[in-house]
Amino acid sequence: MVTNICMLMKISHIGRGIKKGWLLSVTLFFSLHAAAQEDPLPSWNDGAVKQSILSFVKTVTTEGTNQFVPIEDRIATFDNDGTLWAEKPIIQGLFAVFRVHRMVAANPALKNKEPFKAVLENDKAWFGKAGEKGLIELVDVTHTGLTEAEFAAEAKLFFETVKHPSLGVPLANVLYQPQLELLAYLRMNGFKTFICSGGTIELMRAISRPYYGIPPEQVIGTQFKYRYVDSAGVNDIYRMSGIITLNDKQEKPVNIQYHIGKRPILACGNEGGEGDVYMLRFSQGSTYPSLQLLVNHDDAKREFQYEEKSNKSLNMAAQYHWQVISIKNDWKTVFNK
Amino acid sequence: MVTNICMLMKISHIGRGIKKGWLLSVTLFFSLHAAAQEDPLPSWNDGAVKQSILSFVKTVTTEGTNQFVPIEDRIATFDNDGTLWAEKPIIQGLFAVFRVHRMVAANPALKNKEPFKAVLENDKAWFGKAGEKGLIELVDVTHTGLTEAEFAAEAKLFFETVKHPSLGVPLANVLYQPQLELLAYLRMNGFKTFICSGGTIELMRAISRPYYGIPPEQVIGTQFKYRYVDSAGVNDIYRMSGIITLNDKQEKPVNIQYHIGKRPILACGNEGGEGDVYMLRFSQGSTYPSLQLLVNHDDAKREFQYEEKSNKSLNMAAQYHWQVISIKNDWKTVFNK
């Protein structure tokens, strides 16, 4: 073949053709390279927080140093309410109200029974008196007593039809655009992204993949008692009354251990309910480099402003050097369109 | 470029070189294609069971029919004891005995305390009298009262040092070679493979990836109570006394729902303890095509022969048309070397 190649090189027309082709491919290569250098987090403002994310991902994905994390250990866990989507009001609560209306429509006798009556009549006094017990009872009666197939159908209808009460948009549009970019960026770098939320698992599983690109098997949440039924034409899981794990605070690392069996190297939560601090601490105990992110709801104009009376989450963020995401300063845009 | 190409074609030396190159690539292509046609399950004998597996995988992965299953729904769950590795004796039991010796060595006063005493003295009478309660107590005291990091170190040492008592080989070699091929074949076809076992999760997680290619986040098993501790220099999960879920029989579909949130389309278990029938039934309720496999321990010569007094698993296999894997007839070789 060598003689042939020499002949080839000597033929100037062919030579020029090859040179043009070479130039074209080199140009194409650099264009692609430049595209790869484009900002993967366009909705994040430049600053220390954004830089910490980019720097962390680069560090743990660059081979040849003792900071490299093998792909199978690149686990990222995200809270949901107030971290991936807005929580004013809690969407789980909207679902409970949706279910009250659905259940009363199917069985009108319920309208005289509590807590259905209190919801239909917007009886704040009843809920004030019933306290947390009343709320738990409301969630329980509206989320149990049906099969998984029936529940999945209810959840699907809910997300298709209900709008956010104050933002006035479909629930698919109350997601945080910068967080969607962060999830995609992490996955592009070999991370497995999980939700670890106080919300009930099957409600989140109805939308985790279309909204966030997170498949059902990567959703960790609050769980009701389940019972498997295989008789009388039913082959399914029956959702029973009673919460077996409320996935909040110290239960988050517990359920991460049950579900994943690895510490996350990136954990993201929010201040508001003191609910994510132990998930972030658990990730910080990794022998690998790790990054803890805490969303601070400080933007009254574009989102909702709220803080904890105890200020526990922000205090721990300072004590343990977590990265605090200021919605006001760090996010160029808030909601996905 | 056209003139150049014509000149190129006219140069006979180059033409012959190109023809040779073309022939080489065509040969290579067909070699690769033939390799792809090679048997992916070489340790399985030809027969109805092997054919059912190959046919099922082809059906659900071929686009354009209503039998096609999207890749995200290709979930396969496997029992472990008696399905992926030998269970005579139960390896969890060997670990409990290993732990007794470890704990007594660290704290000699334990040798006078039950159930440590009964294990050290091989006191079958004590275990006969204590019954199931005694066994649960033995598992409990040997598996709890330590952090996850401490437990992981114990599990690692166990698998590195303990041999199978009758087969006389390391535990890494009591795996079923045909099942390892099946797992790899499924993954090559886009399946996510899970373990769903009565064994305790963290013991299986110590070896699930090196032995089976199954990562810890895809292991479902029996769970002890966990408590998260973040104080006095400890940042870890503490393993507490008390089983919160015994992952057997009807609990298998329940834990599959918690952990995965999807029905498996392939489920594989074994007869021996009636433990897998509901996992197989749950998979059979899928709206997708599904395949249920049951390993029958009928090979006294090469493995261990045992059956259920009730014959429940094999009866249900006949009733529901599951594929029964005869170790004697369907497996060319049993253990991995």
Image: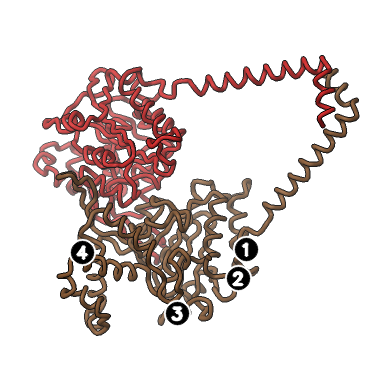
Chain colours: A red, B brown
Give percent across and percent down for residue B30. 75, 47
Give whichever of discs 1 and 4 has the lower sequence position.
1
How far apart are the two marked residues, 1 and 3, measured between alpha carbons? 27 Å
Numbered disc 3: secondary structure: loop
Q: Amino acid at mark 3?
A: Glu
Q: Are labels 1 and 4 on one chain?
A: yes
Give whichever of discs 1 and 2 has the lower sequence position.
1
Q: Amino acid at mark 4?
A: Ala
Give the labeled residue for mark 1: B42
Q: Is residue A280 left or right of residue A192?
A: left
Q: Is residue A40 above or below residue B125?
A: above
Give percent across and percent down for residue A130. 11, 44
Q: Are labels 1 and 2 on one chain?
A: yes
Report crowding for label 3: few under 14, some 14 to 19, many 20 or more residues within 10 A (C-alpha). Answer: some
Q: Check if mark 3's residue and mark 4's residue have beta carbons within 8 Å.
A: no
| Residue A207 in view here | no
How far apart are the two marked residues, 4 and 2, measured between alpha carbons? 45 Å
Q: Which numbered marker is on residue B307?
A: 3
How far apart are the two marked residues, 1 and 4, measured between alpha carbons? 47 Å
Q: Amino acid at mark 1?
A: Pro
Give the labeled residue for mark 4: B106
Q: Amino acid at mark 2?
A: Lys
How far apart are the two marked residues, 3 and 2, measured between alpha carbons? 21 Å
Q: Check if mark 1's residue and mark 2's residue have beta carbons within 8 Å.
A: yes
Q: Is residue B10 left or right of residue A271?
A: right
Report crowding for label 2: few under 14, some 14 to 19, many 20 or more residues within 10 A (C-alpha). Answer: some
Q: Which numbered marker is on residue B332?
A: 2
Please identify, in this view, whether the residue under mark 1 or under mark 4 is nearer the observer.
Answer: 4
How many tags in the picture? 4
How far apart are the two marked residues, 1 and 2, measured between alpha carbons? 8 Å
